[in-house]
Amino acid sequence: MINFYINSSIYTQVLLATLMTWGITALGAALVYFFKKVNGNILDAMMGLSAGVMISASFWSLLNPAIDSASKIGMNAWLIVSIGFFVGSVILILSDILFGKILSKKGTKNLTGLKRSLMLIFSITLHNIPEGLAIGVAYGSIAMHAPGATLTAAFMLAVGVGIQNFPEGTAVSLPLRREGFSRNKSFVFGMLSGIVEPIAGLIGCILVMYVQNILPFFLSFAAGAMIYVAVSELIPESQNNKHKNLISLFTILGFVIMMMLDVAFS
């Protein structure tokens, strides 16, 4: 299986990686069959670890190759990378603001369970798009021979995204169950919240492979999106745990593991 993955085309590798992240979303959603409530300490530790992986990957797997790639093709590296990073962050910020306004509209509390549930699904699905793009860009940069881009780094980035997808799948399916949905329907909706990642991953890979000049921008764009997800969602959510110091250690551990793998195999 490993040899098949290594020897596959870049498109197959992207598809397999993003199908894995989608599969982990489905695993998280599947907890609706076994639990009414998931152990918060385990979820917080997973989110803390994932935050560390994503922050580390944002530099070693995305920003650093973006700077090197921009310099290699004669671009103003600091400018294009800064713009890409900023745009990637702002798009997710705007999406959060938009969704917040939808929820705060008068009468939202009186919506039917279905409409409330669809809003929840929309919110998490929206966040999965830039994550899929980030994975696709990481793999596409390998095909473009971007400095510092490696298969190990791209795969570990996908692993980091997958880890944080697990609680997202759970975050959809369990509330739906509480709304009165059947376990099967709750699982299906939770699973489908991650379906955009394989699609976005292939799109990101194709874009950077056929338009080389946008590679630095897209790499930094993906980094900005990943950092925003880590600092606005994963870290604050995990730090609600009463064992904050222990959860912080998981975040640091995630960063170190990703850095070691990326540097060692680059």
Image (cartoon, rainbow, N blue to C red):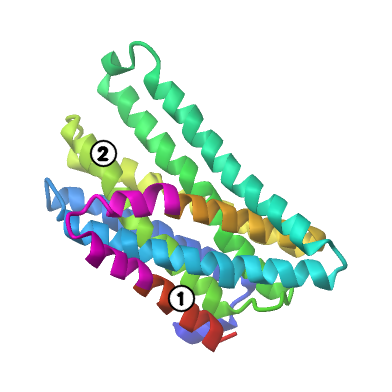
Tag of residue 185: 2
Residue sitting farthest toward the right:
74
Read off the residue under disc 1: 258
Graded by Cα atoms within 10 Å as few (under 14), some (14 to 19) or many (20 or more), the crowding at tag 2 reads: some
Q: Report whether 63 appears left or right of 19.
A: right
Q: Position of residue 186 (x, y in %)?
A: 25, 40
Q: Residue at x 30, y 70 (%)?
A: 249
Q: Residue at x 35, y 66 (%)?
A: 251
Q: In this rendering, is residue 199 above or below 78?
A: above
Decide: few, some or many residues near mark 1? Use Cα within 10 Å; few <14, some 14-19, many ≥20: many
Residue type at tag 1: Met
Marks 1/2: CA–CA distance? 36 Å
Q: Quadrant of residue 74?
A: bottom right
Helix, strand or loop for disc 2: helix
Q: Amino acid at mark 2?
A: Lys
Residue 243 versus residue 113: which sits nearer the camera? 243
Residue 187 appears in which quarter of the rendering? top left
Secondary element type, mark 1: helix
Residue span colored magenta: 231-252
Q: Is residue 198 visible?
A: no
- Find residue 224 and name its label: none
Q: Is residue 242 magenta?
A: yes
Q: Would you say 46 lies left or right of 132 here?
A: left
- Compared with 219, 254 (above or below) is below
Q: Is residue 263 magenta?
A: no
Q: In which image quadrant can residue 163 be found?
A: bottom left
> How far across and how far down the image is residue 228, in percent?
50, 50
